[in-house]
Image (cartoon, rainbow, N blue to C red):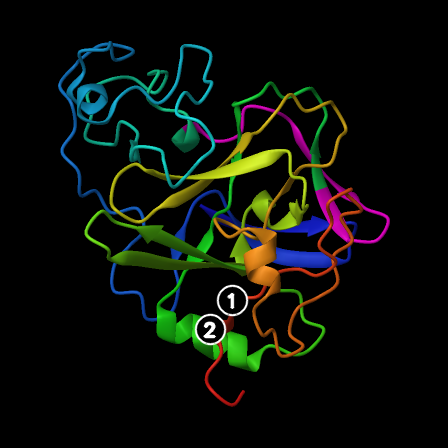
């Protein structure tokens, strides 16, 4: 579903609750690829093939059980559209959307931000980072065309496989996206990111609470991803990195930048 939202009459974009295909992508992000379980009950039990294959993802209250480390966690697969269980299944969390009331608000120095009007317990799902799934060619084209002061909503998801291969999935929320585009960076974030798969192998980037979050507290994740700030700060940014305004005690001063999206000489 795609529609238009307006925030404070200053920002207009097309809204989507889940991924959509960007230019040149030769597949639909919501196509059904995976075989489903035949549990035939409202919620799967520990003997469900989906849970036996990859382990339990959530407890009955929706807390993520595998921890915040993407590098060390097992693959996360939820029950999918082919499964015979109900929408309230314990293995359906990210696909059911945000469970807490989220508010877009104006921050002091970072433009818009996102917060919850109620407390969010540790390890509960907050929202996805959902938008256009792009090809590498398209994301490099958009990066080259970006002006100096343009806001950058491109996230490049890199997943390392056991055989050494890396899956790269660029996601852009500039023109089409969900409320995830309003979540700012912090060098001391209260959210962590996990890639979750539902109907196919295109990752859905899910944000979970890294600790108990107070009502009205700004939600934030780290743009550094699986790099340490020290590693990323040592790279040659060629003046492309923006100043960080997270104001945390461990603030690195500058936001990260994916240099491999730029062509040599640009």
In the rendered image, the vertical position of residue 251 relative to residue 36, given as above or below: below
Q: Residues within 10 Å of mark 1 (few under 14, many from 20)?
A: some
Number of numbered labels in the structure image: 2
Q: Please name the residue shown 32% across and 71% down the image.
A: 24
Quarter-of-image position of residue 255: bottom right
Measured Cα–Cα span from mark 1 to mark 2: 6 Å
Q: Please name the residue shown 77% across and 28% down the image.
A: 216
Q: Residues within 10 Å of mark 2 (few under 14, many from 20)?
A: some
Q: Please name the residue shown 16% across and 28% down the image.
A: 36
Residue 108 lies within the magenta run = yes
Q: Please name the residue shown 66% across and 49% down the image.
A: 185
In the rendered structure, are the residues bearing label 1 and label 2 in contact, judged by CB atoms less than 8 Å apart? yes
Please provide percent x and percent y for residue 3.
54, 50
User: Where, quadrant-wise, is the C terminus in this rendering?
Assistant: bottom right
Quarter-of-image position of residue 189: top right
* Magenta-highlighted residues: 96-113
| Residue closest to the eye, 114 or 234 | 234
Secondary element under disc 1, as helix, strand or loop, is loop
Secondary element under disc 2, as helix, strand or loop, is helix
Mark sitting on residue 258? 1
Quarter-of-image position of residue 240: bottom right
Residue 190 lies within the magenta run = no
Mark sitting on residue 19? none
Please provide percent x and percent y for residue 60.
41, 10
Please provide percent x and percent y for residue 201.
25, 46
Q: Is residue 258 left or right of residue 137?
A: right
In the rendered image, the vertical position of residue 241 relative to residue 161, given as above or below: below
Mark sitting on residue 261? 2
In the rendered image, the vertical position of residue 237 relative to residue 172, given as above or below: below
| Residue closest to the eye, 198 or 136 | 136
């Amino acid at each position: 579903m795609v529609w238009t939202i307006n925030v404070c009459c200053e920002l207009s974009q097309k809204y989507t609750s889940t991924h959509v295909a960007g230019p040149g992508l030769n597949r639909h992000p919501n196509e059904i690829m995976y075989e489903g379980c035949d549990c035939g009950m409202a919620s799967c039990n520990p003997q469900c093939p989906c849970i036996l294959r990859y382990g339990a993802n959530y407890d009955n209250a929706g807390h993520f059980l595998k921890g915040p480390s993407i590098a060390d966690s097992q693959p996360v697969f939820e029950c999918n559209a082919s499964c015979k269980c109900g929408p309230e299944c314990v293995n359906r969390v990210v696909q059911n959307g945000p469970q807490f009331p989220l508010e877009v608000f104006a921050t002091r120095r970072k433009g818009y931000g996102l917060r919850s009007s109620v407390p969010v317990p540790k390890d509960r799902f907050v929202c996805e980072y959902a938008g256009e799934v792009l090809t590498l060619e398209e994301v490099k084209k958009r990066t080259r065309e970006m002006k100096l002061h343009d806001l950058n909503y491109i996230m490049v998801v890199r997943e390392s496989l056991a055989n050494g291969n890396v899956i790269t999935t660029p996601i852009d929320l500039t023109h089409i996206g969900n409320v995830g585009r309003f979540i700012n960076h912090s060098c001391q974030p209260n959210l962590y990111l996990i890639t979750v798969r539902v109907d196919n192998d295109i990752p859905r980037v899910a944000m979970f609470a890294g600790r108990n979050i107070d009502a009205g507290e700004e939600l934030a994740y780290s743009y550094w991803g699986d790099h340490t700030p020290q590693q990323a700060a040592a790279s040659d940014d060629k003046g492309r990195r923006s100043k960080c305004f997270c104001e945390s005690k461990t603030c690195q001063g500058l936001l990260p930048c994916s240099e491999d999206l730029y062509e040599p000489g640009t």
